Image (cartoon, rainbow, N blue to C red):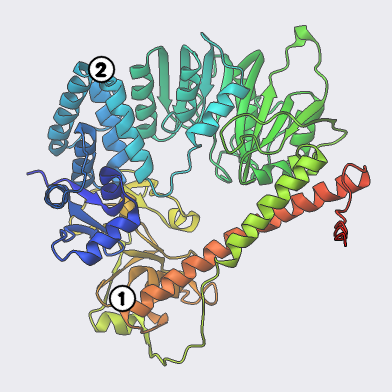
Amino acid sequence: MSGPAVVSAADIARLTGVGRSAVSNWRRRFADFPRPVAGAPTNPLFAMDQVERWCLERGKPFEADDVDRLWQRVQAEVEGVRLAEFIAHAGASLISPRGTALPEPPQEWSPLFDELARAAERAAEDGAGGASGVFSRLCERFRAARERASEVDPEVAEAMAELAGIERGSSVFDPACGTGVLLRAAAARGASVLWGQDREPAHAEITRARLVLMGGEVEVAAADSLRDDAFSDRRADAALCDPPFRDRHWGWEELADDDRWAYGTPARGESELAWVQHCLARVRPGGVAVVRVPASAAHRPSGRRVREALASSGALRTVAELPGAQSLVWVLDHPDEQAGRPSADVEFVRGLLTAEGAWSSFLDRAELLGAADLRPSSHVTPGTPESSYAKGRAALLAALHDLAKAPPELAPNDVPSAAASIAELVGDGVVEVQAAPLAAPADRGTVPLLTHKDLREGREPTGRTTEEPGRVVLRPGDVVASASGDAPPRVAGEAESGAAIGARLVILRTDPERVDPHYLAAALSSGPVHRFRGDPLKARIAVLPLDRQRAHVRALRRLADTERRLARVAELGARVVDAGRCGLSDRALAPAIPRAPEETPP
């Protein structure tokens, strides 16, 4: 029996064409607004048919098509941790041949696949893109639902494809393709031969389905590219890659003598330099590799030798800074011996994309004698001094204005509050504690498993375990904590719903009318890092009324936002100071001297 389609407040806002605040206002003002039927207190879910009926009765717009209704049913019937698997099977059901390496889907998903097929048929009849358009929209809904999604933005993917010079008929390879964002950008520019690989089978299948529906020659493998390269005998015209960042378990020990490390063996903590060299090894002579890396990969001491080899050999051509300065795009050429040795010049770009998404021009060219630091900010000042200083100063003043409103107002606490241990809250029936089985397998089975490492690194469940009676699974709103206190607790969301918990993890399940889960997680995270090492039941938290708990959480979120804004102000300030000093030193700028007021004639 299928459940009703459900919608979140964000879904209601999208389907009615209003803002989230308007939906919150409806819930407060109208006593007959539908009550939540699922979800957590912080992210309630409503029956879609009830919300639609309420909107129609109130004369409010509510526009939902086949894909909207299908997606809301998917959210109601598919556990969050199995969404990727469902989307993969959905894609496989729309293409031919339908073969997939994934396990057979549950029988209860069949009605959803039937509904998807009907939606694709209607879209084809209406000229709305057919199966390709429907599946693309379903994938975009999936992408938006993944709270910790880290794939590159489509706008950046388009820029990376342009940097690679991809032309019609090109062959393009992505060894860490995820759900295919970069390969789709390549296909949009005319690439006709597309090869992808990803270690997550569901993601690989999603990529394959989307690309097959777009047309062209497609081959996608499900395996770890560094350890098990499915395309070692191929050479593409271009490689696009957005690899996993800061992965210390990329295969450093078993791959130490691999022949792909032409520019030096990457250190254990330099996984990005392994991916860069892997991409270079899989493009033809004269081919281009475009790789996104974290900003730290440009200056970490452990990667200096490989960076210097890439720069001095002429393989590294461009280092471009993405908006926010948290990551960079490296553009590299596979040396073509017949064309001669390229120069060891590197182009540096600060701010690869403008606010409008258009290209910024290359700003400088510098010959590197060494490559200890490949950050664009270390080599160039953006734009001309006069324009850069004026724009930077305006941006800094705007950021300072926003920063002034960011910190929450905090007053001396004049309301005494008692403290209680988690064990005492359990005794009062306010919190329920559940732990993982001692012998739970973490590397086989069909049930997604949140491991201790997943919690520590803030990522979605990556393990698998077996289906067993009584196994503890996560619900939205559960607080997941480490039994040893060496990982920050977090509140589970829809994306983790249905996942089992691994060894050394515990679930703290609260009565949401008495303890806000986000308040509990924040209380356990504050103070000394290991405040409840060895036994979370001994941790003590302040017992506050529910409204004060939620106010506490809002204040912490505003403090986190303040911290982010401070970092942005520091970055903008440094750029303004650099531009000002350069402008003054080369006489392009001068201090503004106020003019004396003109004398008033008698």
Mark 1 or mark 2, which has the lower sequence index? 2
Residue neighbourhood size for the residue with mark 1, other residues' Cα within 10 Å, grouped as few (<14), some (14–19), many (≥20): many
Inspect the image, locate mark 2, and give the three-letter code of the amino acid beneath it. Gly
User: Which residue appears at 22% of the width and 80% of the height?
Assistant: 429
Image quadrant assignment for residue 510 = bottom left
Alpha carbons under labels 1 and 2: distance apart: 51 Å
The residue beneath circle 1 is 515
Q: Is residue 200 above or below residue 501?
A: above
Residue type (three-letter) at the residue carrying disc 1: Val
Rendering coords of residue 233 (x, y %): 54, 14
Q: Is residue 236 above or below residue 451?
A: above
In this rendering, the label closer to the viewer, 1 or 2:
2
Looking at the rendered structure, which numbered label has been put on residue 259?
none
Q: The residue tagged with tag 2: helix, strand or loop?
A: loop
Task: Work out whether 539 lies above or below 404.
Answer: below
Q: Residue at x 22, y 65 (%)?
A: 29
Mark 2 surroundings within 10 Å by alpha-carbon count, few (fewer than 14), some (14 through 19), many (20 or more): few
**Residue 505 point in image, percent of width and height:** 38, 63
Which residue is denoted by mark 2 in the rendering?
A: 127
Q: Nearer the viewer, residue 164 or 276?
A: 164
Q: In the image, is 331 to the left or to the right of 509?
A: right
Across and down, in percent, residue 477 comes to 30, 63
Give the residue at x 44% y 30%: 223
Please state, as top left, top right, bottom left or bottom right, where the C terminus lies in the image.
Answer: bottom right
Question: Residue at coordinates 80% horizontally, 39% vertically from top-left?
Answer: 380
| Dot 1: element | loop
